[in-house]
Image: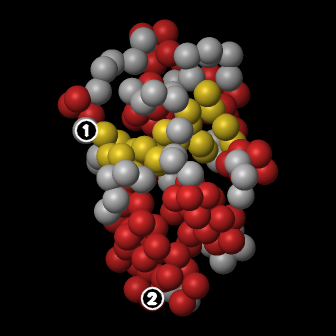
Amino acid sequence: MEITIDEWIVHFIADSRKQKDAGQFLETVFRKCDRLVAMKGGGVTQKIRWMSKASENWALPARILVRYFLGSFLWNSEKFHLLDESNLKPVLPEIEQETPQDDRYLVKTAMNTQDKLILTTDSKLKKKLSHRQELTIHLVDEFLQQYDC
């Protein structure tokens, strides 16, 4: 399964109260034949760049989780697929119009994957696009309960 992610993963890794959830999610993705997907230059890749620098001053558990994420995912093309926007097919105009401007890169990324699945904490995005059959949007907390973590 290809799981399109947004910035939540960085926030979960950085938050000591959410690190366990992030770690279990990443271990499950790694153990399964699943892969995380993001767009080059999109919001999540910018946050990952910030996290890799800022984490030098974080507590040890967070630094370990950052190293695990970078080594096992970001630098592993079997587990993390970075899509180049110039190679992506356009989104249907009606979907693009319904999508908030800030989330269009995320929807475009997901629509160019086999599973067309977005994992997010953005309940407004889910509500806005939940009627679209071409796309599946899961909220992180709900997904983690079902995802064999």
Position above or below: 130 against 46? above
Position above or below: 29 against 5? below
* Left or right, 50 with reference to 15: left
Please name which of the two marks, 2 or 1, marks the residue nearer to the observer. Answer: 1
Determine the CA span between mark 2 and mark 1: 31 Å
* Labels 2 and 1: the sequence-earlier one: 2
Residue 46 visible in the shown view: no
Q: Is the Cβ of the residue at disc 2 closer than 8 Å to that at disc 1? A: no
Q: In terms of secondary structure, where does tag 2 sit?
A: helix
Residue type indicated by callout 1: Asp
Residue type indicated by callout 2: Asn
Residue at 72% over, 52% down: 148
Q: In terms of secondary structure, where does tag 1 sit?
A: loop
**Quadrant in which residue 57 is drawn:** bottom left
How far from the left and from the top, in percent, is residue 87?
23, 29
* Front position in the image: 101 or 73: 73
Mark 2 highlights which residue?
57
Residue at 51% over, 47% down: 33
Mark 1 highlights which residue?
84
Q: Which mark is residue 125?
A: none
Position above or below: 91 against 73? above
Residue 80 visible in the shown view: yes
Q: Residues within 10 Å of mark 1 (few under 14, many from 20)?
A: few
**Quadrant in which residue 19 is drawn:** bottom right
Residue at 52% over, 76% down: 65
* Front position in the image: 94 or 144: 144
Residue at 40% over, 45% down: 38
How far from the left and from the top, in percent, is residue 63?
49, 82
How far from the left and from the top, in percent, is residue 110?
46, 31
